[in-house]
Image (cartoon, helix red, strand yellow):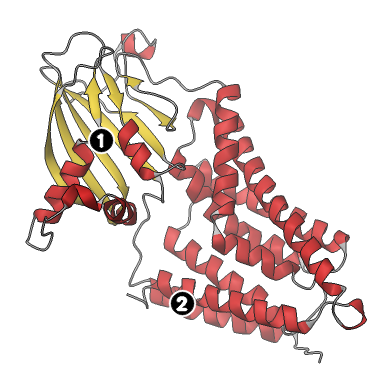
Amino acid sequence: MNFRVRPATAIFAFFALASSFLASSLVCSPAFAHTGDISSAKIVPETGDRYRVDVGFLGTDIERMFQETQEERAGVDLSPPGVLEAEIGKFIVRRVDLRNAEGKLCASKVVYAGEDPTNPYDAKVSLQFDCSGVAGPILYDPARLMTTQGKRAKQLVSIGERPDQPVLTPEQRVGATPGPGQVLIFPDDGAVDLSKPLLTPTPWELAPKFLHAGIEHIMTGYDHLCFLLAVVLWASRIWPVVKIVTAFTASHSVTLTLAALNIVTLPSLWVEIAIALSIVYVAVENFFTRVTDTRWRDTFLFGFIHGFGFASGLIEIGVPQRAVVPALASFNIGVEVGQIGVVLVVVPLLLALDRFSDKGKRSPKIVYPCSALIALFGLYWAAERVGLLG
């Protein structure tokens, strides 16, 4: 059965639905500061060889880690007020160290644990370390925390300014003494020497990390994958798929770059809602047309929105200002590698299934159920992001 609908009608219906969701979002627009498996640590030198370390992470990450380490809290009742926060503090302080090269630890205590005051989706733990009795350079070591986070763990470490030193000294400007800086570390990177400036890695050191991060972002970005899957479900020839992927790459690369460089920014919540609705649109479109030669127009237009979504992952990691080009290029290439990998699996599988259908053509029995499922996912994500699901 062939379904046809006027393009103007479909577009009007889509934007009517989008408008209703965006209007609802005005009353619920939280910012998203952390993403899964990425934590942050801001280290602030204080007077008297003391340091404050603020560790931040996504609230759902601590829930997952608590579930995986329940034996540490055997017999502890988390329901009384303040107990959960205290246990979160203990959980982090056991896994984050300041020490010297010989392994002598700085004395530590928790000064705050709980919800991040700047973002209700995040958790924050503030630790204070006294290193007055520890000789030699001080190292920051979050290895045990990153091990608990999982194999995809990353941490963005930044050095804050001293309260009595609000601007960089001439020595800090030339790197003679450590100054504020930022570096992304992975589980295998080892401890961070606080006596040295946080130097931006060379392009050769940086590229593999951001390439890996780009691949990881697309492979775990199920909304982006659903969008891509929906637009190739009717594809039976290679050339339309090439155009679809190329158009998507061209447009999302533009907004990924603009957003990562903070030239153009949009509210994160609105972007996430628009991405969910774009999934609904391309999935529903499969019920009204089987033409794939022109669907590159869909991916080109919606790619601009998805680019802002990709940028959120890159911004969360942090773009080194002295290595913007290799970081952006590597991350974008990683996204494309993951994207092409998915297409190279899905399209041949669909073509193989065609051999078992009537007349060797794509069967609606495959496309319609898949499209309906993808559309439901899109609606669910849109409703969740608007706040309709609590």
Total numbered labels placed on residues in the image: 2
CB under 8 Å between discs 2 and 1: no
Is 21 placed above or below 243 here? below
Q: What amino acid is found at the position of numbered circle 2 in the picture?
A: Phe
Q: Which badge, 2 or 1, is on the more N-terminal residue?
A: 2
Callout 1 secondary element? loop
Instruction: Look at mark 2 in the image and give the residue it sits on.
Output: 21
Residue occupying the point 16% across, 13% down: 134
Depth check, front residue: 349 or 108: 349
**Side of 177 relative to 251 (left or right):** left
Crowding at dot 1, Cα within 10 Å, few <14 / some 14-19 / many 20+, comes out as some
Q: Which residue is mark 1?
A: 95
Residue drawn at point x = 33 percent, y = 57 percent: 60
The disc labelled 1 sits on which kind of residue? Arg
Looking at this view, is 59 or 88 the one in front? Answer: 88
Taking the spot 41% from the left edge, 44% from the top edge, the residue there is: 150
x and y percentages locating residue 23 in the rendered image: 42, 76
Q: Which residue is nearer to you in this view: 171 or 92?
A: 92
